[in-house]
Amino acid sequence: MNATDKLNFLISDKNLAAELRNIAEKVLREERITFEEGVLLYEKGELGYLGVLANYIREKRHGDRTFFNRNFHIEPTNVCVYDCKFCSYSRLIKQRAEGWEMDVDGMMDIVKKYDHEPVTEVHITGGVVPKQNLEFYADFFRRCKAHRPELHIKGLTPVEYYYIFKKAKLSHYEGLKYLQSCGLDSMPGGGAEIFHPEIREQIAHDKCTAEQWLDIHEQAHRLGMHTNATMLYGHIEQFWHRVDHMERLRQLQDKTGGFQTFIPLKFRNKENQMSHIPEVSVVEDLRNYAIARIYMDNFDHIKAYWAMISRDTAQLSLAFGVDDIDGTLDDTTKIYSMAGAEEQKPGMTTQEVVELIKNVGRHPIERDTLYNVVTDYQDYIFDNSPQKKSYYALPVVNP
Ligand code: SF4
């Protein structure tokens, strides 16, 4: 049965609740679901049902194609003026001796380490400290572009930009325009957490608000930059807070069309101020990916960070709406491991990523940041490929 047959079969199931059938029919007609229907999916949508809907949308958009990229990370500091309760990564200014703070030369040393590697992107994010200001990043972006012009700079989030632009007395638009002229190409999706103030004030009370986060992305889109968006789920928020979060993003996307990818991020409880909160199950992770795929009808891609959720869950997620599992990574990022992710030394070779995708029957594509195809690995044979691949279809979508 293909994805359409499975959806039709599900719709014809007489035992399916009418309200869930209505949503399934909307998905088949490619109609947008409402806020209330989004909440209903969280409250009543079982995993198998959600998988059928999300996989239908995923295959309609991308077939089996599954994207990854080859990038490296620079985390200029893990010291931070803010105090997000869920953060396992940062060291407050008063504990700065325990952390690291790079200078531009140190960041360039990391860039140069990859001179002979076929990476297409540098992803820059970290804490917020006063001396890593507008000119600090302008200098780095210029030097990075001068050194390797084709390397795509995906840099910083509205959390950093809000602080930096305020200090520099620039509007969001002016600040981004200036940094774009220095080499900034696009923005990752971090810092969004949960937008609703009822939750945001409890978990991230002192950093940029939802409105400021959204405005910085809107200004980036006005400047022609593409950006991503995240949602930190599975802590103190209710289901409707998640839908509210996605609704705000969906509305901005209707206006600008500048988002590429939505990335749900699972709350991890290692060594942070919310360690007493249990983490949600893998079933809830998969339900959340599926609902994101169904709700975010104007986002092209849904991404799962394999390094955060484990390789096995990343494979499963490809049957629940996810079409992108991020990059090969290596030991340059500590954000995942310090938050308690399964992968304490996140790194996969290109061959490992390709095999991970192929082993669940999907079609691996290396992309650049803007989803241009770099290499299609469907028929690619690595020198040391195993003779026979273990291949199976995931048995999760039969109603
Ligand atoms: S989540 Fe980001 S802004 Fe918040 S404390 Fe951690 S590094 Fe700082």
Image (cartoon, rainbow, N blue to C red):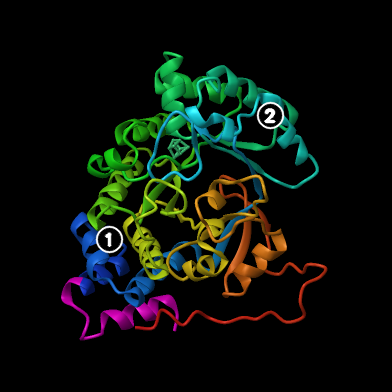
For the residue marked with disc 2, what is the amino acid?
A: Cys
Query: Sequence order check: which comes first, mark 2 or mark 1?
Result: 1
Quadrant position of residue 397: bottom left
- Assess mark 2: CB under 8 A from ligand 1? no
Residue 105 inside the magenta-drawn segment: no
Q: Please provide percent x and percent y for residue 180.
A: 55, 25
Q: Please provide percent x and percent y for residue 81.
A: 44, 28
Q: Please provide percent x and percent y for residue 178.
A: 52, 19
Q: Please provide percent x and percent y for residue 390.
A: 65, 81
Identify which residue is drawn at 22% across, 42% down: 198
Q: CA distance from mark 2 to mark 1?
A: 44 Å
For the residue marked with disc 1, what is the amino acid?
A: Glu
Q: Which residue is mark 2?
A: 144
Task: Please indicate whether residue 344 sits to the left or right of residue 130 in the image.
Answer: right
Q: Residue furthest bottom?
A: 14
Q: Residues within 10 Å of mark 1 (few under 14, many from 20)?
A: few
- In this rendering, the answer to whether 171 lies above or below 51 is above
Q: Which residue is mark 1?
A: 31
> Of helix, strand and loop, which one carries label 1?
loop
As rendered, which of 337 and 182 lies closer to the eye? Answer: 337
Identify which residue is drawn at 26% across, 83% down: 12
Which numbered tag is attached to residue 371?
none
Quadrant the C terminus occupies:
bottom left
Residue 13 inside the magenta-drawn segment: yes
Identify which residue is drawn at 67% across, 25% down: 104
As rendered, which of 314 and 381 lies closer to the eye? Answer: 314
Q: Residue furthest right?
A: 383
Quadrant the N terminus occupies:
bottom left
Task: Please indicate whether residue 215 sits to the left or right of residue 312 in the image.
Answer: left
Quarter holding ligand 1: top left
Mark 2 and mark 1 residues within 8 Å of each other at the beta carbon: no
Which residues are the magenta region?
1-19
